[in-house]
Image (tube, helix red, strand yellow):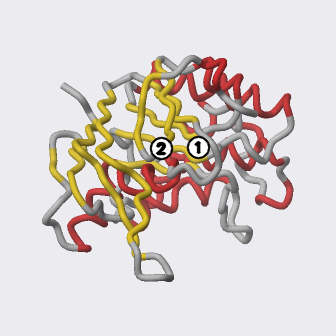
Amino acid sequence: MSVLQAVDLTKTYVGGDGGLITVLEGVNLSVERGEMIAVVGASGAGKSTLLHLLGALDAPTRGHVLLDGVRLDGRDDDELSALRNRKVGFVFQFHHLLREFSALENVAMPLRIAGAGEAKANARAKELLERVGMGPRMLHRPGELSGGEQQRAAVARALAADPAVLLADEPSGNLDHSNGELLHDLFVGLARDFGIAMVVVTHNRALAARADRVLLLEAAALSDADVREVVT
């Protein structure tokens, strides 16, 4: 059974002249547990919009999303927020770590907000930080970490609640080649080891090449792609 599924997903906006702008048109997508899918395409093609719809950050104009067997349409903001917190992890190009807290505290924070005790949250955060190679640096604050270390801490934070789905938007876009390769290795391992369904939006040819499938978003629709079509 697919962990994440989009059915006839369409998103339109009203432009400044009152006309409709179609960003996505009839997108169908299915992601299995342990599968990593790369979504590629030109800037402005709607890749980030697709992630927002898949992660219940926005609602489609038509169609629906099923997240771990649960349809997202027809649910109020509180229900969607609860589903996001339990089922979805997000990783963005910029880490968005809270600078006044250590890496350990940043990763533990989603669990503390969800009601977990300090000891349990910290134990989970420590486990994840060690998994992403941040064990020796977990007590450092973001300002004391390199860009690659900050992004790995952000990945650990996204996994804190043991989500069914991980959505990443240009996760290595702000990293140098060496740190980007470390992050790519990490993503592949996480999809396999955690059995998580992963959708990664990227312009990076190397990262797309590591995915189980590459999908090209153009003309507001998704289609299978050869990684050689990726534009870096």
SS assignment at label 2:
loop
Residue 170 horizontal/vertical position (percent): 64, 44
Residue lying at 56% horizontally and 22% vertically, measured from the top left: 188
- Sequence-first disc among 2 and 1: 1
Q: Is residue 8 left or right of residue 50?
A: left
Q: CA distance from mark 2 to mark 1?
A: 31 Å
The label number, if any, that marks residue 93 in the structure image: none
Circle 2 residue: 219
188 vs 136, nearest the viewer: 188
Amino acid type at image mark 1: Val
Q: Nearer the viewer, residue 178 or 104?
A: 178
Q: Position of residue 1 (x, y in %)?
A: 18, 25
**The disc labelled 2 sits on which kind of residue?**
Ala
Q: Residues within 10 Å of mark 1 (few under 14, many from 20)?
A: many
Residue 157 x %, y % = 54, 50
Closer to the camera: disc 2 or disc 1? Answer: 2
- Look at the image and tell me in which quarter the C terminus lies: top right
Relative placement, left or right, of 70 versus 161 is left
Residue 232 shown left or right of residue 63 in the figure? right
Q: Which residue is mark 1?
A: 155
Looking at this view, is 19 or 92 the one in front? 19
Q: Position of residue 141 (x, y in %)?
A: 77, 59
Answer with left or right where residue 222 lies relative to residue 26: right
Marker count (numbered): 2
Q: Residue at x 78, y 41 (%)?
A: 148
Viewer-side residue, 177 vs 23: 23
